[in-house]
Image (cartoon, grey):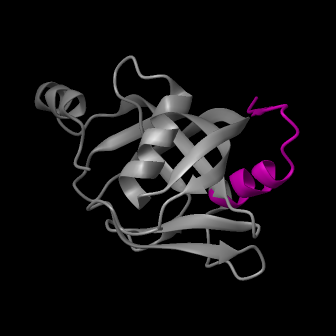
Amino acid sequence: MPTPDFVLSLREKIGHELLWLPGITGVVLNEDDQVLLVRRTDNGRWTLITGMLDPGEEPAAGTLREIEEETGITAEIEHLIHVGSHGPITFPNGDQCSFLNVGFRCRYLGGQARVNDDESTDVGWFSLDRLPPLSERHTLLLKLALEADGVPHFER
């Protein structure tokens, strides 16, 4: 999905200046202990499912929306695993953002994993012992999801 309209409207006023935005990360696991990953169009890296919340959208609902929009998969929230900040990030077009990120462990319910929008070039399930390189942040979120006991991790 392209940049949300509310961000484009803000960008018309502030250009590439730093924006503080609400983001989500979904760690989707299936019954075979595989994790769902996408290969991003903008940088070619494999990542967990990420996205921005729409104005007024609840984080859990936004996470499930992003999972379906990006991969065609339906899932359910199991645990809140992480709340923290991420960034600043400079995107290829020069836009700068920092995110308040809310991370959830999610359970696969159904659907066939596929590229379902223009944000990724590939989608797949990966065994935990055969993961492609992930960022330090996504490695931490995956670890937290695997250890999730219902008590979220908060950055200090």
Q: Position of residue 12 (x, y in %)?
A: 11, 30
Q: Nearer the viewer, residue 83 or 107?
A: 107
The segment highlighted magenta reads 138-156
Question: Is 146 covered by the magenta stretch?
Answer: yes
Q: Quadrant of residue 34?
A: bottom right
Q: Nearer the viewer, residue 87 or 50?
A: 50
Q: Position of residue 44 (x, y in %)?
A: 40, 74
Identify the residue at the far bottom of this view.
Answer: 130
Q: Quadrant of residue 80?
A: top right
Residue at image location 22% in from the left, 27% down from the top: 6
- Residue 91's place in the image compared with 80, above or below, is below
Q: Quadrant of residue 131?
A: bottom right
Q: Nearer the viewer, residue 93 or 62?
A: 62
Question: Is 154 covered by the magenta stretch?
Answer: yes
Residue at image location 74% in from the left, 63% down from the top: 31
User: Where the C terminus falls, by quadrant?
Assistant: top right
Identify the residue at the far left of this view.
Answer: 12
Q: Is residue 42 left or right of residue 152?
A: left
- Residue 88's place in the image compared with 128, above or below, is above
Q: Is residue 132 left or right of residue 42?
A: right
Identify the residue at the far top of this view.
Answer: 56
Residue at image location 32% in from the left, 54% down from the top: 91
Residue at image location 20% in from the left, 26% down from the top: 10
- Residue 62's place in the image compared with 110, above or below, is above
